Each structure stands twice: as C-alpha cells, then as structure tokens.
Image (tube, rainbow, N blue to C red):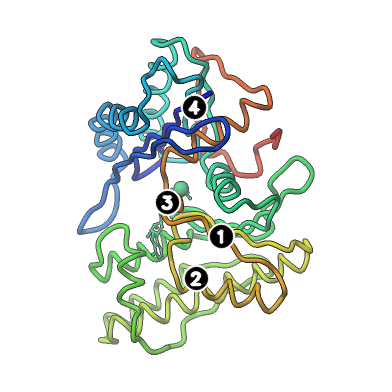
Amino acid sequence: MICLGIESTAHTFGVGIVRWNGTILANLKESVTSIKGGMIPAEVAKHHREVANKILHKALEAAKVSLNNINLISYSAGPGLPPCLRVGRDEAVRLSKQENIPLIGINHCVAHLTIGDLLCKTQHPLYVYVSGVNTQIIALAGKRLRVFGETLDIGLGNALDKFGRAANLGFPAGAELEKKSEGGTYIELPYAVKGMDVSFSGIVTKAQRLLKEGTPLSDVCFSMQETCFAMLTEIAERALSHTEKKTLLLVGGVAANKRLCNMLQIMCKERGATFAAVPLEFSGDQGAMIAWQGILENKSGRVDNPELADIRPYERTDDVDVTW
Ligand code: ATP
Ligand code: FE2
C-alpha cells in the first residue's frame, strides 16, 4: 500500500510518496524564496499551481510508481494561507476523482510531529515544534496533542525571517542567519519567557535597532540565536519536568539549526533525557510528512469525501483527535 501526500500550506509545494510501513519512496518539493524577503499569498499560490504537475510527475518517477499504484491521496488541509491551501486541496481532489483513489485531508503541524516520530523512532516524546509560524512545546495527553507552551506573538522562524529582511539576508533567512552568527559576540536582548510561553517580537525590534546603529551583523545574529534558543530551552526543560517525559524531539524548519540542537542536547543530557532531531530533509515543509500522517489516520479508519474536501486555515495542533 502506498500514499501520495501533497503539501502546499505556505512557501513550499511538495509531493511525497510513502509506503504503509513508513518507507519513503520520494519526496520532491519546490519552495518560493526571495532576495528582498516576504511572501504574497496570491503569488505563492500561482507558483504552486505552475509547479504542481511537474513535481507530481517527478515524484512518481523518483518513486518508480504510477498513479495506478497509489492507494491513498493525502493533503495538508491546514493551517496555512488559504490561496496556497486551495492549490494542494484542488490537486488532491482532482487526482482522487480522476483515479478513484481514497482521499484524506490532514493537519500540517501534526504531520511535522509524526514524521519526526517515524524517522527518529520516538514514541510519545515531548515535541519542540519550531517552524515559521509555530513555536510550540507539545505532548500527547489523552487523545490530544496538548500545547504546554507556545509563542505569544510570532513564531521563531518568522522572527528570524523578519530580522533577516531588515538585514538583507533574503527569505527564508534562518539558515543564512545561522551562518552569519559565526564568530559573533553576545549583546543582551530582551529575554521574554512568561511562564511556559515565550515572545519574540521585542527581540526582533531591538535587533533591528542594533543593526541600524552599526552593530556588526554577526554580533546581532549570534545574540538573536543565543537569546531565542535559550528561552526555548528553558520552557522545554520545564515541560520535560512537568510531563516527566524522557525524550525530547525537535521538529519543524528551525530544527535545521545546529546551535539550537546543541543547546537542547546539553539540557537533555544534564537531565538524563534523550534528545532527537528530525533529519534535515524532513525538518521544513515537504510532502512525505503529509503522506505519512495520511497513512496513520487512514489506518485508524478515516477517509474523506472528495466532494466535501475542505481547507482549515486556522486548525490548531490541539484541535486534532489522535486516533492513531
Ligand atoms: P508552519 O509549520 O508553522 O506552518 P512553515 O511551514 O512556514 O511554518 P517550516 O517550513 O517548517 O515552516 O520552517 C520554515 C522556517 O525555518 C523558516 O522561517 C526558516 O527561516 C527556518 N529555518 C530554516 N533553516 C533554518 C536554520 N538553519 N536556522 C534557523 N531557522 C531556519
Ligand atoms: Fe511547516
């Protein structure tokens, strides 16, 4: 049995092809990037529409399968930008109807978590989910993935991207900011932890001001990373202690950052917990995670009616019933 997953929530259009046992056969994607920074939803959706067919066929080719071999089509129903979500949904519905393949619409954030479990072989860890929009500390409690702590304003990735825009690092800026931080020295930035939550916008404002005043870019990048990651490490440690979890799993696009991995790893080691991070290829948005989440939910009996296939732009991680 094979599932084809379609991702289109934001900057990336991706198609992943995954076997029921979790073997990833293909994971193709194309992302919108820009030198100036920022994304206009209608333009991103246009990009996705233009590349959809090409990516689909490249993925089928890479997986050495044809549409006849696909047993389930999964798509990101949300959360995300509505014009972008519609591209993935429409493509999924079209394929489902044309080839008579069952369809399922899943939650993108939950897929970031479960692809981590698949690849790191973790079971019910404490998740640290850091991406563009989201920054959440999550653990399974009952039938829900409960959010124990989160950002009160913007996601960590968006904070780095926002600063990156002012510093001409291009979009997305996280990886470039990581490079620029090398050799920097620390300058104090507003450390904003409120109970189990964090906020990043004060840090971005101060970092932008420092840059304007002539502070070396490497110092500002280094200080942003140190401050934001230390805040995250603090709330992650508190959540490990509350939940008595013994494993921490880092997922989402910002999981690509080596310094963040390093800080969380040190904290886990000191507490006798295990640290795992989703492999780089699967940290940012891609279709394999959408396919795998589709498989998990389909195995537990879910299937959607293509006539009623919706998009859910605001669906939260903790809105989803964990049936798998
Ligand atoms: P969400 O999953 O919340 O909907 P998203 O889909 O936009 O958000 P992802 O693709 O998971 O997010 O992650 C993208 C983010 O990861 C961007 O903000 C980017 O700057 C950040 N990122 C990528 N590589 C790195 C890195 N090496 N260091 C820090 N941040 C990084
Ligand atoms: Fe994402």
> Given this view, does label 2 or label 4 mark the residue nearer the observer?
4
The answer to the question of whether label 4 and label 3 lie on touching residues, with beta carbons closer than 8 A, is no
Is the CB of mark 2 within 8 Å of ligand 1?
yes
Q: Position of residue 284 (x, y in %)?
A: 42, 51
Q: Sequence-wise, which precedes: disc 1 or disc 2?
A: 1
Could you tell me which residue is drawn at 42 percent across and 64 percent down?
A: 159
State the CA–CA distance, disc 3 to disc 2.
15 Å
Q: What residue would you read off at disc 1?
A: 250
User: Residue at the left extreme?
Assistant: 35
For the residue pair 202 and 315, the one nearer the viewer reads as: 315
Q: What residue would you read off at disc 2?
A: 260
For the residue pair 269 and 190, the one nearer the viewer reads as: 269
Q: Sequence-wise, which precedes: disc 1 or disc 4?
A: 4
Residue 14 in which image quadrant? top left
Position above or below: 159 against 142: below
Could you tell me which residue is drawn at 27 percent across and 26 percent down?
A: 53
Residue 8 in which image quadrant? top left
Q: Sequence-wise, which precedes: disc 2 or disc 4?
A: 4
* Callout 3 amino acid: Gly
The answer to the question of whether label 1 and label 2 lie on touching residues, with beta carbons closer than 8 A, is yes
Q: What residue would you read off at disc 4?
A: 3
State the CA–CA distance, disc 1 to disc 2.
9 Å
